[in-house]
Each structure stands twice: as C-alpha cells, then as structure tokens.
Amino acid sequence: MRDTPLDFSSPDLGVIAPTVDSNPTQTAITRSTPGIRPKATTCPTPDLNFVATADLPGLIEEWLLECECRQHAATTNAVRRVFANNLLWFLRHRGFEQCGSRELKQFFLYLARGHEETGGRWGQGRFTKPLRPVSIKDYYACLRSFFGWMESEEIVALSPMARISRPPVRDEVKQPLSETQVEALLRAARLSQSPHRDEAIVLLLLDSGVRANELVQLKVSDLDIKNGNFFVIGKGNKRRSCYFGQATKKALLRYLRGARLAEDAALFPGTKDGGSGRALTRSGLLQLLGRLGRVAGIEVNVHQMRRTFATTILQNGSDIVAVRDMLGHSTIAMTLKYLSVSQSHIEAQHRQFSPADNLRRRR
C-alpha cells in the first residue's frame, strides 16, 4: 500500500469525522455488517468508475476484513478506517451521492484547505491548522489501495484514483534528539510520578528502537535481563529480537525490584487503572512522552525515539544491515528514511575534515 511509514503523529489521526445526518457531537460512523457486500446501487455491471456513497460503509468493512485476512498490522488498519470514514464524512457533508474522480479531487482539495472553513476541518473547531503534506500523501496511499481493491473485485471497471496524481511531498529533514535533549528527557522521567517506570521506558525506547505497540505489549516474561534482549511481534506478525545495553539493564532491574510484577504481567502497567495491572496503552504511552517532553522543553514522539536510536547506533559504528534488522524493516531503503544526521554531528565533521584547514596543515 505504501513505501513510507504512516505518520502516527498527525493531529487528525485517531479522529473520525462526525456523521452529517446525526448529532454533530457524535464521532462514530454507523458501519455495515463486516464481510457482507452491500447491494450494488451504482453499477450492476462493472462498467462505471464510481461507487454510490450509500455503498461505501459496507465496502469499507469488506476491504478492512480483506486487510485483516492478509494479516496487515492492526495499527495500519486502524488508520485506514479513520481515513476511509473521513472520506465518507466529506461526501455526506457535501451531499455527494456518488464517489468518483471528481469527488476525490475535491476531497484532496478539502484536505489541504478544510482547516480554513468555519468550524474547522471535519466540523471540529480544534482542527484549524493545515494538514501536513505527508499526511495528505498518506490519505492518497490509503484511498489508492481501497479503490484498487474495488477494481480487483470488479466493483468498478477502473479505480477513480488512477486519474489522480500523487500529491507532491518535499522530503522533511527530521532531526534525532541531541544528547542534551536525551539527558533532559531522562531528568524529566526521574521527576515524574512513576520515576523508575518512566526512566525504564525512555531508556528502552532509545536503546532498542521498538515501536510504540511493541513496547506496550511486552510482558515481564518477555525480558531476558541476563542476556539483554527480548522478542517482539512486529508489523506483518514478524518476530524479531531486540537488545538493550547495561544502562537500560540497570534501569529495568531497579524498576522491577520496586514494581514486584508477576511473570505474566504487563511489563509497563498504566498508572490510572486503579492498580489492576492493565498494560499501558499506545495512547497512554504517547501522552506520557508528551508530558515528559513538556517538562524537558522539547517535542518528542516514538518515531523520533526510533530515529534517534537508528542514527546514534549507526554513528557509533553499527552497519546499516544490522540497523535494518533491529528496526524490523524489510528493506534498507525504509531504514534510510529513518536516518538523519544531527546538525551538531555535521558541524563536528566539518571542523575535523575542513578542506581549507587540512590544506593549511599539510603546508
């Protein structure tokens, strides 16, 4: 479906636009029964390149069921559901009875300008800032997959997305955390309400490069403290080994001694569950990093932690193939998109290898 990681930091992610024909404060969209294709109201024979808006809820569910059968990641399917349902909201909001190339082009225009409308994008006042180009590109990839599936199922003769050009996206130079920022983040963790847990979380993210979902699914029994490794089930249900060093090992031991968790318990339980031991959720992890970032005076998210891990371990001498395997990527091209050279490293490299300075030394 895509050749770049989904942007999970998008402000619209996880928000399904409210339905038009119901209470405007309601955010859930009524869905058809999963796995049952709606009765076609658009094209009794596959000779048209559009579908009826009324058919879309059932088609979305059938497509997502197909994605689940192919064992696509649950987080990826959750994003697909949000994007597809936001398209459905737009079509209903504009009164479009069908969805073809014309309506999709207007939808992409709305993605770029919807924040300017009264009431904000999706009719929600909090969305008054422009959607990032990379997020619009994610919508494009999602809808291209959705309508491509319809074409393969002969629901449409030709995907209406085939006539829509891919949105241009400039490469964003995303910086990893600097050493000073990492130290500030660790200080913030040690001052939190759960200092040992939060310090262990920050260090494990930085030292292993795990994804958010992989971290929150860990159990105590998954850790091999002695050998400094653990296993995770990543995207595509792929099992891989992750590793951590001595500093993280000490932080984990300090945390586990105080937490007194059972072997089959969640490694990182939430702090607002009344002591039930339920695992910290992905949303809870993102909120935790947000709080620590505010105390540290920086903006931080899990993707940035993974980028910091990849960049730092490569600068410390690891090879790119090993980094690919540590991150759980299928190709080196994907890994390269996570790597970024910090400005301080660029400056240090120039000071060391300045052509003019080295010329002067040879005289």
Image (cartoon, rainbow, N blue to C red):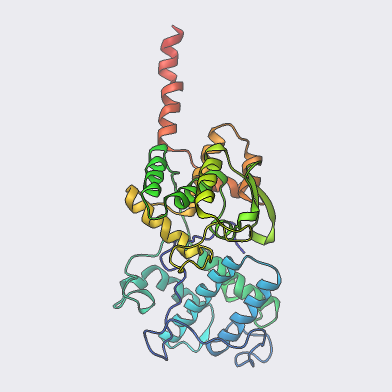
Question: As rendered, which of 237 and 83 lies closer to the eye?
Answer: 237
- Work out whether 361 lies above or below 67: above
- Work out whether 49 lies above or below 221: below
Image quarter (top left, top right, bottom left or bottom right) of the C terminus: top left
Q: Is residue 48 left or right of residue 111?
A: right
Question: As rendered, which of 51 and 225 lies closer to the eye?
Answer: 225
Image quarter (top left, top right, bottom left or bottom right) of the N terminus: bottom right
Q: Is residue 328 left or right of residue 283?
A: right
Residue at screen point 37% across, 56% down: 291
- Work out whether 290 lies above or below 342: below
* Residue 149 x/y as whole percent: 66, 75
* Residue 17 x/y as whole percent: 43, 78
Q: Residue 217 sits in which quadrant?
A: bottom right
Residue at screen point 42% across, 58% down: 288
Residue at screen point 40% across, 34% down: 344
Question: As rendered, which of 198 and 151 lies closer to the eye?
Answer: 198
